[in-house]
Amino acid sequence: MKDLVPPEGTFSVESDKVPDKVDVAGSDEAAETQETVLSDQQTAMLMQALHEEQNLLMGSLSGLFAAIVGAGVWAAVTVATEYQIGWMAVGIGFLVGYAMRLAGKGIAPVFGAVSAVLSLLGCAVGNLLTFIWLIASTEGLPFMEIASQLNSAIVIEILTSSFEAMDILFYGLAAYFGYKTAFRQVTQADLDRALGKGF
């Protein structure tokens, strides 16, 4: 069952143990760590339950919505400040990844890949919206009139002409954080539910 193995660095059961940090309210002592030992059978049950709860369609739709919202914020901030803040690409990556995590509950590598692509899309659309506004403002035309005249060739020309070397870094970070943030974080409650509180 290879598709049940999460990508490295996202979720793993090391040495058949899953740590659960317990913070005692009102205590000055550091939080103690309790370890729950899982048998191979329990680990398989957990992975199967997590796999069945995945929803790539909902995760992708939520990620797409987050990418569009992020693109709009990117464009609005750039237009308002008249300065492109590259670190907003990282924010788009986090936003898309978090949306994918909440709606998709994914542990398979495809969730990270889709999130990374959507993060890049959000950055590109944010840049595109910014330049459409700049063109509309310069020409004294309505935004929607310029937007309605776009075709793939014009979009590619706008994006390539506005691309700078530093964009590689920020786009790369957007894709990275989109990927890393997209995966489900397994909690003790998830373990209890998946295993029927059997340990």
Image (cartoon, rainbow, N blue to C red):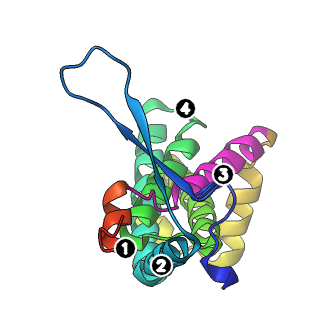
* Coordinates of residue 107 in the picture (x, y in percent): 54, 69
* Coordinates of residue 14 in the picture (x, y in percent): 63, 54
The residue drawn where x is 50% and y is 44% is: 91
Disc 3 to disc 4, how far (Cα)? Answer: 24 Å
| Marks 1 and 2 in Cβ contact (< 8 Å) | yes
Relative vertical location of residue 144 with respect to residue 30 in this rendering, above or below: below
Left or right of 105 on screen, residue 25? left
Left or right of 195 on screen, residue 166? right
* Coordinates of residue 80 in the picture (x, y in percent): 41, 35
Q: Amino acid at mark 3?
A: Tyr
Determine which residue is flagged by label 4.
Answer: 83
Say what secondary structure mark 3 lies in.
Answer: helix
Q: Give the crowd class for mark 4: few <14, some 14-19, many >=20 residues within 10 Å.
A: few
Q: Earlier in the sequence, mark 3 or mark 4?
A: 4
Report whether residue 145 is seen.
Answer: no
Q: Amino acid at mark 1?
A: Ala
Q: Earlier in the sequence, mark 3 or mark 1?
A: 3
Disc 1 to disc 2, how far (Cα)? Answer: 7 Å
* Front disc: 2 or 3: 2
Q: Earlier in the sequence, mark 1 or mark 2?
A: 2
Disc 2 to disc 3, how far (Cα)? Answer: 30 Å
Relative vertical location of residue 7 with respect to residue 130 in this rendering, above or below: below
Which stretch is magenta?
A: 166-187
The quarter of the rendered structure image containing the N terminus is bottom right
Magenta stretch, main secondary structure class: helix
Determine which residue is flagged by label 3.
Answer: 176
The residue drawn where x is 48% and y is 58% is: 96
Disc 1 to disc 4, how far (Cα)? Answer: 49 Å
Determine which residue is flagged by label 2.
Answer: 45
Q: Amino acid at mark 4?
A: Tyr
Q: Amino acid at mark 2?
A: Met
